[in-house]
Amino acid sequence: MIRTQVYLPKYQIDYLKLLAGKNNTTMSDELRKKIDLTLKIGKSTQTLSEILATADTSWFGEQDEKNLAKNRKQISQRLKGWAY
């Protein structure tokens, strides 16, 4: 690995500390997880909802991610209904 330096506002650092403490990991581990998820989204042919529903991430529990994907799908359908 190569060491990097990232400047973040205090609220993001506080959130990373909270998240790392909750998941018993480091702030760097949490950042790596989210970067990997972002890369997966960029390379995937799946929709964002499908990726979030199956993502290996600790931001949400598995059921939370499924609910998030379901909610995003419902919002998308409503927006399409309003647009047409």
Image: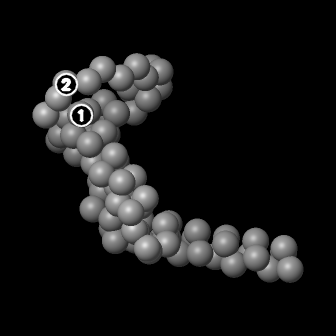
Q: x and y percent of residue 81 in the render?
A: 80, 80
Q: x and y percent of residue 31 in the render?
A: 30, 39
Q: x and y percent of residue 65 in the render?
A: 41, 66
**Residue 64 higher or lower than 37, as above or below:** below
Which element carries disc 1, helix, strand or loop?
helix
Look at mark 2 in the image and give the residue it sits on.
Answer: 3
**Residue 34 higher or lower than 73, as above or below:** above
- Residue with the most extreme left position: 1
**Residue 37 higher or lower than 22, as above or below:** below
- The C terminus sits in image quarter: bottom right
Crowd around label 1: few <14 · some 14–19 · many ≥20 (10 Å):
few
Asked whether the beta carbons under mark 2 and mark 1 sit within 8 Å of each other, the answer is: no
Picture quadrant where residue 64 is located: bottom left
Tell me which amino acid carries mark 2: Arg
Across the whole image, how many numbered discs are drawn on residues? 2
Look at mark 1 in the image and give the residue it sits on.
Answer: 28
Which element carries disc 2, helix, strand or loop?
loop
Crowd around label 2: few <14 · some 14–19 · many ≥20 (10 Å):
few
- The N terminus sits in image quarter: top left
Q: Residue at x 35, y 23 (%)?
A: 6
Q: x and y percent of residue 68 in the render?
A: 50, 66
Q: Residue at x 40, y 19 (%)?
A: 7
Q: Does 10 sit left or right of 61 as displayed?
A: right
